[in-house]
């Protein structure tokens, strides 16, 4: 009887040990959000590296500096610039700035026809232009009305900021964003044209220094805001128009004969 009992125990103990080893040990999840150094890997991007900060910093500096030189304010005020421009150019006037403000846009069809691809397809690029134009026109008009700054030639009180300059720099910013991956020279050419518009607005005695510098800021900021708020949901998929995928499948039933089945899968 004792021999049988010992044999039973000898058979039972290995099976028990095997069964215990087969039970999985719960994983330690208390440190799953830590890297090898013990510092949390879920870190928030620095504010100074965020898209919003990078999009706003240059326009904010331009608008701020422009506002600081209104009238006789600042180290080199608008009055100082106006006196120097009039001393060099006298009573010279032209209307080239009325046409030159749109010149940066002319780069886009020319470059596309040459076979260079833009960053966005044509549908989304068109939507970005429309959106940025709306932002620029609305913001410039509101600021012009609120500030009520008189033009150098005294024609009206809608001087600050310069709408022509804002338009030119908006177009230049779009050209730069769309083609900078191909070549930086597209943007350099566009910004050179925009700077020419700013210069001619002062030469033609239509704007102060403060107006054109701030206008450049408003134009660049409008383009940046349009890009930041755009989601590229148009023009990429020919079917469904962004609401889902559609397909047509031929079908046949014994009673109904041949037909066509429409399938729609929502996004």
Image: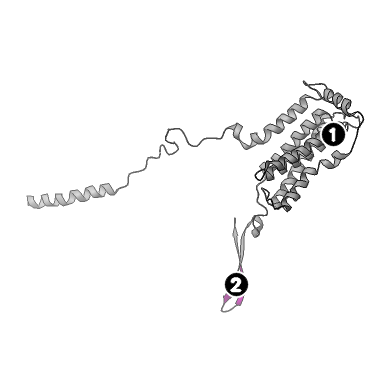
Up the image or down, 263 lies above or below 159; here it is below
* Circle 2: element type: strand
Nearer to the camera, 116 or 134: 116
Read off the residue under disc 2. Answer: 250
User: Would residue 254 be counted in the magenta stretch?
Assistant: yes
Instruction: Identify the residue at horizontal 18%, vertical 51% (top origin).
Output: 12
Image quadrant for the C terminus?
bottom right
User: Would residue 18 be counted in the magenta stretch?
Assistant: no
Nearer to the camera, 94 or 249: 94
Q: On the image, which quarter does residue 208 sit in?
A: top right
Instruction: Find residue 47 and report its horizontal and vertical position in percent.
Output: 60, 32
Residue 215 visible from this viewpoint: yes
Earlier sequence position, callout 1 versus callout 2: 1
Instruction: Find residue 233 and report its horizontal and vertical position in percent.
Output: 65, 51
Say whether residue 27 is left or right of residue 97. left
Most frequent secondary structure within the magenta stretch: strand
Read off the residue under disc 1. Answer: 201
Residue 138 visible from this viewpoint: no
């Amino acid at each position: 009887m004792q021999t049988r009992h010992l044999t039973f125990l000898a058979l039972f103990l290995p099976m028990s040990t095997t069964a215990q080893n087969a039970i999985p040990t719960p994983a330690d999840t208390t440190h799953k959000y830590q890297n090898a150094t013990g510092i949390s890997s879920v870190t928030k991007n620095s504010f100074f590296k965020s898209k919003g900060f990078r999009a706003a910093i240059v326009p904010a500096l331009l608008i701020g500096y422009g506002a600081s030189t209104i009238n006789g304010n600042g180290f080199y005020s608008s009055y100082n610039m106006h006196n120097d421009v009039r001393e060099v150019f006298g009573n010279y006037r032209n209307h080239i700035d009325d046409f030159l403000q749109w010149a940066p846009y002319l780069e886009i069809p020319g470059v596309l026809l040459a076979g260079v691809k833009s960053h966005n397809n044509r549908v989304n690029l068109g939507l970005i232009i429309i959106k940025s134009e709306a932002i620029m026109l609305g913001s410039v008009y509101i600021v012009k009305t609120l500030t009520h700054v008189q033009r150098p030639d005294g024609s009206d009180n809608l001087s600050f900021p310069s709408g022509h300059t804002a338009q030119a720099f908006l177009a230049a910013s779009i050209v730069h964003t769309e083609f900078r991956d191909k070549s930086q020279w597209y943007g350099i050419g566009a910004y050179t044209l925009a700077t020419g518009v700013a210069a001619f607005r002062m030469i033609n005695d239509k704007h102060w220094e403060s107006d054109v510098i701030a206008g450049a800021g408003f134009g660049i900021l409008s383009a940046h805001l349009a890009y930041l708020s755009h989601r590229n949901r148009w023009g990429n998929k020919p079917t469904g128009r962004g609401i889902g995928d559609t397909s047509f499948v031929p079908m046949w039933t014994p009673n109904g004969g041949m037909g066509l089945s429409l399938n729609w899968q929502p996004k």
